[in-house]
Each structure stands twice: as C-alpha cells, then as structure tokens.
C-alpha cells in the first residue's frame, strides 16, 4: 500500500525527483493565474528555440470553481505541480511513471492509463495534444505536448506534466475530502485553506465590486498593450495575467454575458499573441542565450 | 520457400477511437505496397493495441516478379540512316533503355513504323525492397497529428520503436532517430523488452510480456470475463459494443473486475448513473434479472489480477465522488421552480449573432402553435405544446445539465415531471432533441414531434437569417442533421410539411407576435428551402431511390416534403407500366412548350371559343375534369389521370399548331398548355426522368 505522504512531502518528493531529471526548481510565480501553464515559466518559455526544463508548484485560482469550502473536491484555489521539459524527452512517459514510483505508487499495484485528452486554452492561444492520466479510474495528471502557444506554432515541442496535487494527495492519503488532507506536521489542509476558500468564494460570487473589476480590466489591458509597445515583455505579461484573473472574477460573478464573454476572451488572446511574438524577438536579440547548440543557434538567429 | 515479414510501430498511447481505423489503414497500405512492388504473398494479419500497430505478412515470395515492358522509341525513318545503319537517335534510345540496337524491333503505329525494345526488369530480392516500408509508415494519416521533441514530422503520437523483421533478419530503416530492429516492448507495468526472433513468433512472444496483440482475441477475452462475472453474480448485462470497442483499445492485457457503489445513489435518475459509469468512467452498468439498475458495475483493468483490490477500491472511490456531485445537483436543482430557470435563459446566448435562448423559445412558441394547428393537433395537444414550448430549454441552466451536458432534455423531462407538469409536456421536452443522429430514434408523441420540427426549423431559419450557412464540410451547428431530422419526422408522422407555405405562415406569425427579434428571415428564405430539399435528396439516396426520380420530385413546384416522398413512390411504382415512356414523353412535351411562355397558367383565361379543332376541346375538357378534382385525389390518382391524357395530348399536337401568327389563338393555346404543365409540375419536373 502507498505510504501516507503529507502534501508537503509529496511536493518535496516531486521536486527532488524532477530535479534529478534535469529540471530547475522554480518558485510559484507571484501573479494570480488559473493554471501553472500561465506562469511565464511555462507560457513564455515554451515559445522559441531555447531548451527549458523546469518544475514548480503553482497555486491556481479559479473563481468559478469556488464552493465556499463545502465541496470535498472543488476549490477556488488548488495547487498544481508543473513540470515542463523542452524539447520533450523521448522517455517522458517513463520519467512520469518514475515520479509515481517515487511517491510510492507502484504501477504493478494499480491501473495506470493514458486516456486521450487534447488540451486547449483558446484565451491564451494555446493548444496541445496528450492525455489525462488515470490512476485506478481517477484523473491525477494532465499530460500535454504543446503544439501552439500564444498563437505561435512551437518548435521544439515542450512536454508539460501537470499533477493535480490535491487529487494526488487525496489518493495517497486515502481521504474523501481535500480538507482532511495532512499538509505537514499534523496540520490539516482544511485548517489552512477552509476559511480562505469560504471568503474567496463569497467574494467572487457575491461581494466583488463589479464596476471596479470592469475598470481594472480595461486599465490592465491598456497597460499591457502599452508595455508591449515599449518592448517590456515581462511587465506586459504580468498585466495580461491580471486581465485574465480579473475576467475570471467577473465571470464568476455572472457579470459577463455570453456575448461579451467571447469578446473578453478575444481581447486576452490578442494580447497573449502579441506578447508571445515580442518575447521571441527579445530572446532573439539576446542571441537565445540558453541555446547551447552552436549550429542550431546560427540557424535560428540569422 | 516463402517468407514472413513483421512490421510493428510502437507508439505512445494512441487515442482509443483511432486504433481500429489506423490498423485498417496500415493493412491497406502494406497490401498496396506489396502489390505495387510486385511482391506476391498469401496472407496479411493485423494486430493492434493502444501502443502498437503491427502487420504480419505470410507466404511472401523470395523476389519481386520480373516484368517485361515494351517501350516505343523514335520512328524507323529516324532510327536508320539512308544506308540502313543505326542513327545516333536509335543508339541513344537503346542505351537509355539499357539494351543494344540489336534488340530493336519495328512495329507499325497509325501508319508509321516505330522502333520498339522490350525492357526487362528483374525483380529484386524482397529484403532489398522492404526497407521502403519506411514510406508506408510515414504516409499514414490520422484525424489529429502532433509533433514532438525538435522534429517537424507529424504523427498520431510519438513513435518510440519499430520492429521490422523478415523471418529472423532485421530489415533496417529509420524514422527520425528510431532505428527499426527486432526488439519490442511489453506491457508497461507487467512486461519488459522482448526480442522478436522470428516474424511468425510475434503474437506468442508478445503474450509472454503481457500483451494480447490480436484485437479480436482481446475483445473476446474481455467479453468472456465480463459475462463470467455477470453470470456468477446473477446480473443482466447488455454489452454496449461502442464501449467495448473503446475499452478494448485502452488496454493491452485485460482483466475485468466488479465494483459497487452505495445504493442510496439509486434515487438519482438512472440516466445520470449510466452516464457517470459508461461515459465518464468507461464502466459497464448492470441490472438484476427483472431489469432494475443495480449499484454495481464491471470495469476492465489494463493488467492482471494482482493487487486488483487497489484498483477496485480506487475506481469505486472515483465513481462515488461523481455520484455525490450528481446527488448534490439533483437536490439543488429541485429547490427552484421551472419559471426560475426559464427566466435565467434570458442570459443564456443561443448564438451571439442570433440572440438568447429565451428569444429562441419565444419564436418556437409562435411557430410550433402555427404548425400544430396546421397539422391538426387537438386542443389539449395544442395546450400541452404551448406549455412545452414556453419552457423546453429550462434544464440547460440546471446544475445537473451543466455537469452532464449530454443529459439535456432527459433531465428536462425528469424535472418537469417532478414539478407536476403534464406528462405530455415533459415527454415533449425530451423528444424535441430527437433524432440526435442520422438514424437516431424519432419522437413518439405528436406534441414532441411538432416541438422537434419547430425547434429544428427555427435553428435552420435563424442561422440562415444571419448568414451562417453550412458550406462544404463546414456545418458547425449540425444544421444538415436538423434538416434531415425534419424530413424523417414528417415522413414518420405522415404529416404534410409544405416548406414554402409554412415559411410564409411562420414569418407572418413572428411579425404579428413581434418575435422576430430583428432577424431577417426573408433574405435567405430560398436558401432554406433548397437546403431542406437537399436533405430530402439525401434521404432518398440513403434509401436507394432512383436518381432521376429524386431529381424530378425535388425540382417540382410542390415544396411539401411528404408529397415529394409520395410522388417518388408513385413514379417508382409506375416506371415499369406499359406505355410509361410514351406517357412521360407526351407530358414532357407539354412542359417544354409551356416553358416558352410567361403567360399566367390560369384556366379562367382560356377561351374555348378560340378553339379551332376537336382535339383542343377534348384536351380542355379532360384537363378541366382532372384539375377540378385534383385536390381530392391522391398523388397516385392524379398522376394516373395525367398519364391517361397521352392520346389526347398526342392528338392535340397532331392537329394543332401552337405557334400560329394569330396572337389571340396562340396565347390561348399556350395558356392551355401552361395550365396542364402546372398540374404536372406539382408532381415533379418530369423532364428529369430518364425513360428508355
């Protein structure tokens, strides 16, 4: 049977494991976002010819998924463990299965399947091909080969492995509610996150200042565009993330009609595409510093 | 001695629905490759799992067959100079073909003699040809393609290994950085690497590493295992073939197992339970002998029986979490009234360019009443229809349909019954989505059928009104399926559905009720008519109707779907009648002449006083008799009556010159023929018929 690792032990184990596979351990990025993919350590680094291998925990906010801390599996904010490797290693599936073993999940003792699930995030101009990984019928990981990021076709391809930490931990600790998970040293997940879950749900669904959010979206958008023009890719990207989160808050509040929804998503997508192009340009000017292969560098910088 | 060749493409997990079509494609490509390369063989066997596509060819010849081909060269007079010696042209030609001028023969072609040589190609040993299997693999196409690592090559999933062995020899080639060899991979957890020492050992060898490579055998194994569990437990199970096919392509080494869930969840509608089990978890649901759904399921593991209890527990836990969610929605949804949900539909967009779901329901309410009256529903049916059309999309905003979109309509019916709506109303809510596929079930109730027709007609009309018209393979809103649904429902209910007439009625009603919501239904009205007629044609072609008959009945003036279907049946039943050819020729002769005039086909404009011979009077009398009673007769009777006019028509044309100089007389005759033509056109454009 699986050893009952606390959530923080699971994180430590994954960090240790992926570090050994050549990944840099990054920290969570400090702007609100809906998924680990939107961290610049994935979104921006998946673009362009430079190699990139990174792993990090990403707290991910999805206001519409908030359930006031009452649903055992749905959360305003959950945690993803994100691994990106570019170019995708030939044995990435085996590496992933190795990480499960490191967590005490022996493939021989379970049923692990790769079930087709192609991933798309139209608001960021992203699309990929891959699977959801089922552990005894439970989806614990999203596994994606990016094909397009920020509207650009990628080359080389990044492989992305996203563990749903709460799901995985619920399985490992054999609890029915995420709030019963042990985070570490006997402290329960619920003791840390139940109140924020309640408050953030109440805020997102009932109390948020819609007028302010609508204005913020416009302001953030303006600032993002201005900074793209100034060639300041990273500040611009931060404001795009803020737009995205602000939109999610508005959406949860029911403040966006279906028609407007498409409009907002298109606005975010257009900025994501612009910043993607700007990022490649910037890296090119720097001579793609992470690209060690001289021939390849010559080819892409000409 | 013959040979065996094995080709295996090892891949990361292929999507389940792609496995079977892909192995069929590979088999065909290998077959074509061998044929094109003149390699004879006895048998091709295919193998497939989620991680591999493999082909075994047996009874292969040693070498390609030799071929002799005659090649034509220059004309004889160019090949020989005046002394009879070979010219440079002849020498060059023969060298080009790998022979000497001594091999040249002459043959005449269209009066000129030419140089010919017989070129012989000796077949190569197959070991030298088989490396080209590389191209066979690379040429495969898939519904979605991806690239990986730093390659630009696209495939269904990354290729991880290739086995290519002729008997016991590797036939080498490489794709990207994968070198074809003789080592395959076993089951991910149970297996290991395995060397294919001989092509014919493939299936047996893979079995030792826990891979059942023969998809058919694997499916048998799953079926047997499931049936055994069901028999042991005294459960009834209907093996869902679609699910079985999918599950078969998700596992390499199947082991079926049973699990259960708390029976408290049985209070949730059965459809929800089934959707959770079948669609979300790929479980087979089970019933007791009386047909009652049981709190048990059967699933299939990709692996053996070891540690099976972990797998059972895990799967039960996941299902329970899903059912807990469903139970939550089921209770929450019932806390609100139907009106509450209907109100919410004002904020739900049907389509950005068209408007809200609520507006759509308002339109459908208007046109379904009109259609219900036209069809002749009684007053209680009309009342049920009215209520249904006011609320029929309400379940779209319930929590359950949000979570289980595939249960739209089904949940609507359940919730409507729980809210004490009339059962007829509840059923219509479910049935209005029908048919959901080209041969899906049709609504059974009249109220449901009218609502289904109105909803589909509004779908088509409103998308056309904003110029979102399907083109080519682009039909994102499945409007073709909707139109075919209209054809199938009217046929099934034997209801008249005169498209043009109804379009006018509906439009007037929508205007009267101010329910057009600024949509311009008029602009593409004709396109809608043609679009639906196209689906009538599709229906015919699916039912093997004769092409010319289909063309005739869909190109007439009657836009009633039922009439078109009937007319086709009538023409089909008379096409072998004695004199059919002559009769049709007589009638089409009328059509051709009538085409030449724009005069109104109004019988009151015919002046018998202008007739100059008996044949005119006789035809006039006969046509009038048929015309006056046409409305009370069936299409068959009318068609027979028209056919019977043939002697009169023949006689008429024998004795009457139409295009005379006297305008009055000429017009009188043209009007007469136009009146008759109009009657013929109401059955169909008989000019389209091919009569021999």
Image (spheres, rainbow, N blue to C red):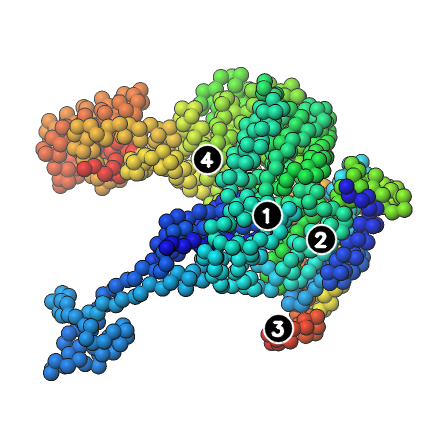
Picture coordinates of residue A73 (x, y %)? 76, 39
Picture coordinates of residue B61 (x, y %)? 36, 56
- Give the answer, above or below, for where B473 lies relative to B66: above
Q: Nearer the viewer, mark 3 or mark 4?
A: 3
Q: Which of marks 2 and 4 is in front?
A: 2
Residue pointed to by mark 4: B438
Q: Mark 2: give few (<14), some (14-19) or many (20+) Cα within 10 Å.
A: some
Query: Splitting the image into 4 quarters, where does residue A2 fall?
Result: top right
Q: Which mark, by number, is residue A277? A: none
Q: Which mark, by number, is residue A296? A: 3
Position of B352 compared to A40: left or right?
left
Q: Which mark, by number, is residue A98? A: 2
- Return the disc, 4 or 1, that comes first in the chain's sequence: 1
**Residue sitting at 42 percent across and 25 percent down?**
B492
- Return the disc, 2 or 3, that comes first in the chain's sequence: 2
Residue pointed to by mark 1: B209
Instruction: State how far apart marks 1 and 3 are (Cα).
Output: 41 Å
Q: The residue tagged with tag 3: helix, strand or loop?
A: helix
């Amino acid at each position: 049977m699986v050893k009952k690792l606390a959530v923080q032990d699971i994180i430590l184990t994954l960090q240790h494991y992926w570090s050994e596979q050549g990944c840099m351990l990054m920290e969570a990025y400090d702007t609100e976002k809906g998924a680990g993919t939107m961290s610049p350590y994935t979104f921006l680094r998946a673009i362009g010819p430079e190699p990139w291998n990174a792993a990090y925990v990403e707290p991910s906010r999805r206001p519409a998924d908030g359930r006031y801390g009452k649903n055992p599996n749905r959360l305003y904010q959950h945690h993803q463990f994100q691994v990106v490797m570019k170019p995708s290693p030939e044995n990435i599936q085996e590496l992933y299965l190795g990480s499960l073993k490191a967590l005490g999940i022996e493939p021989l003792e379970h049923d692990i399947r790769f079930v087709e699930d192609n991933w798309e995030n139209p608001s960021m101009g992203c699309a990929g091909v891959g699977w959801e990984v089922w552990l005894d019928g439970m989806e614990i990981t999203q596994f994606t080969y990016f094909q397009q990021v920020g509207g650009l076709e990628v080359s080389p391809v990044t492989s992305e492995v996203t563990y749903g930490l709460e799901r995985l931990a619920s399985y490992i600790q054999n609890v029915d509610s995420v709030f019963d998970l042990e985070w570490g040293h006997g402290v329960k997940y619920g003791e840390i996150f139940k109140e924020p879950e309640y408050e953030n749900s109440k805020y997102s669904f009932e109390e948020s200042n819609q007028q302010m959010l609508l204005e913020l979206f416009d302001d953030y958008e303006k600032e993002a565009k201005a900074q793209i023009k100034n060639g300041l890719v990273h500040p611009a990207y931060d404001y795009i993330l803020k737009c995205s989160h602000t939109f999610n808050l508005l959406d949860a509040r029911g403040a966006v009609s279906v028609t407007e929804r498409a409009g907002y998503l298109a606005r975010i997508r257009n900025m994501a595409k612009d910043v993607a192009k700007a990022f490649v340009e910037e890296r090119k000017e720097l001579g793609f510093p992470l690209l060690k292969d001289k021939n390849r560098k010559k080819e892409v910088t000409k | 001695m013959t040979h065996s060749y094995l080709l295996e493409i090892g891949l990361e997990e292929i999507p389940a629905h792609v496995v079977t079509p892909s192995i069929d494609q590979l088999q065909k490509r290998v077959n074509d490759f061998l044929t094109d390369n003149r390699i004879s063989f006895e048998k091709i066997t295919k193998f497939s799992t989620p991680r591999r596509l493999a082909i075994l060819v047996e009874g292969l010849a040693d070498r390609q067959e030799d071929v002799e081909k005659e090649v034509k060269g220059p004309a004889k007079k160019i090949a020989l100079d005046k002394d009879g010696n070979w010219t440079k042209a002849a020498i060059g030609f023969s060298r080009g073909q790998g022979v000497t001028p001594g091999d040249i023969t002459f043959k005449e072609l269209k009066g000129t003699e030419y140089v010919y040589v017989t070129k012989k190609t000796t077949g190569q040993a197959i070991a030298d040809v088989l490396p080209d299997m590389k191209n066979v693999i690379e040429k495969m196409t898939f519904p979605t393609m991806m690239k990986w690592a730093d390659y630009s090559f696209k495939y269904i999933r990354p290729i991880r290994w290739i086995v290519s062995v002729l008997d016991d020899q590797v036939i080498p080639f490489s794709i990207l950085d994968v070198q074809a060899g003789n080592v395959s991979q076993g089951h991910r957890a149970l297996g290991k690497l395995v060397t294919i020492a001989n092509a014919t050992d493939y299936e047996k060898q893979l079995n030792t590493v826990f891979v059942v490579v023969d998809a058919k055998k694997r499916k048998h194994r799953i079926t047997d295992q499931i049936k055994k569990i069901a028999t042991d437990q005294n459960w009834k199970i209907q093996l869902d073939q679609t699910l079985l096919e999918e599950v078969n392509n998700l596992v390499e080494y199947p082991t079926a197992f049973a699990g259960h869930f708390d029976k408290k969840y049985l209070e949730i509608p059965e459809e929800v339970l089934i959707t959770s089990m079948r669609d979300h978890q790929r479980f087979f649901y089970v019933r007791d002998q009386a047909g009652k759904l049981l709190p048990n399921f059967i699933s299939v593991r990709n692996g053996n029986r070891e540690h099976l209890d972990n797998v059972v527990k895990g799967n039960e836990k996941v299902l329970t979490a899903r059912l807990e969610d469903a139970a939550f929605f089921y209770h929450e949804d019932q806390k609100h009234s139907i009106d509450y949900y209907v109100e919410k539909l004002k904020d739900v967009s049907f389509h950005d360019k068209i408007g809200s779901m609520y507006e759509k329901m308002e339109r459908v309410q208007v046109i379904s009443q009109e259609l219900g009256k036209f069809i002749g529903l009684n007053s209680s049916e009309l009342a049920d229809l009215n209520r249904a059309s006011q609320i029929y999309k309400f379940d779209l905003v319930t929590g359950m349909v949000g979570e289980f979109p595939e249960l739209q309509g089904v949940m609507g019916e359940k919730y409507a019954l729980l809210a004490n709506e009339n059962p007829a109303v509840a059923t219509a809510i479910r049935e209005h989505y029908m048919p959901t596929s080209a041969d899906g079930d049709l609504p059974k109730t009249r109220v449901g059928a009218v609502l289904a027709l109105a909803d589909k007609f509004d779908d088509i009309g409103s998308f056309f009104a904003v110029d979102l018209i399907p083109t080519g393979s682009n039909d994102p809103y499945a409007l073709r399926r909707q139109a075919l649904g209209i054809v199938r429902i009217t046929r099934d209910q034997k209801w008249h559905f005169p498209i043009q007439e109804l379009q006018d009625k509906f439009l007037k009603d929508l205007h009267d009720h101010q329910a057009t919501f600024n949509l311009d239904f008029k602009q593409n009205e004709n396109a809608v008519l043609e679009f639906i007629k196209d689906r009538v044609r599709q229906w015919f072609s699916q039912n093997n109707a004769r092409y010319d008959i289909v063309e005739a009945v869909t190109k007439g003036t009657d836009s009633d779907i039922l009439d078109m279907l009937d007319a086709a049946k009538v023409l089909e039943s008379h096409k072998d009648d004695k004199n059919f050819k002559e009769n049709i020729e007589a009638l089409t002769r009328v059509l051709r002449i009538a085409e030449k005039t724009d005069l109104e086909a109004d019988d009151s404009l015919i002046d018998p006083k202008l007739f100059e011979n008996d044949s005119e009077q006789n035809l006039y009398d006969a046509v009038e008799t048929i015309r006056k009673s046409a409305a009370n007769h069936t299409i068959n009777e009318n068609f027979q009556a028209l056919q019977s006019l043939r002697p009169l028509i023949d006689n008429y044309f024998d004795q009457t010159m139409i295009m005379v100089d006297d305008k009055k007389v000429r017009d009188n005759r043209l009007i007469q023929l136009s009146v008759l033509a109009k009657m013929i056109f109401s059955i169909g454009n008989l000019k389209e018929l091919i009569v021999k």
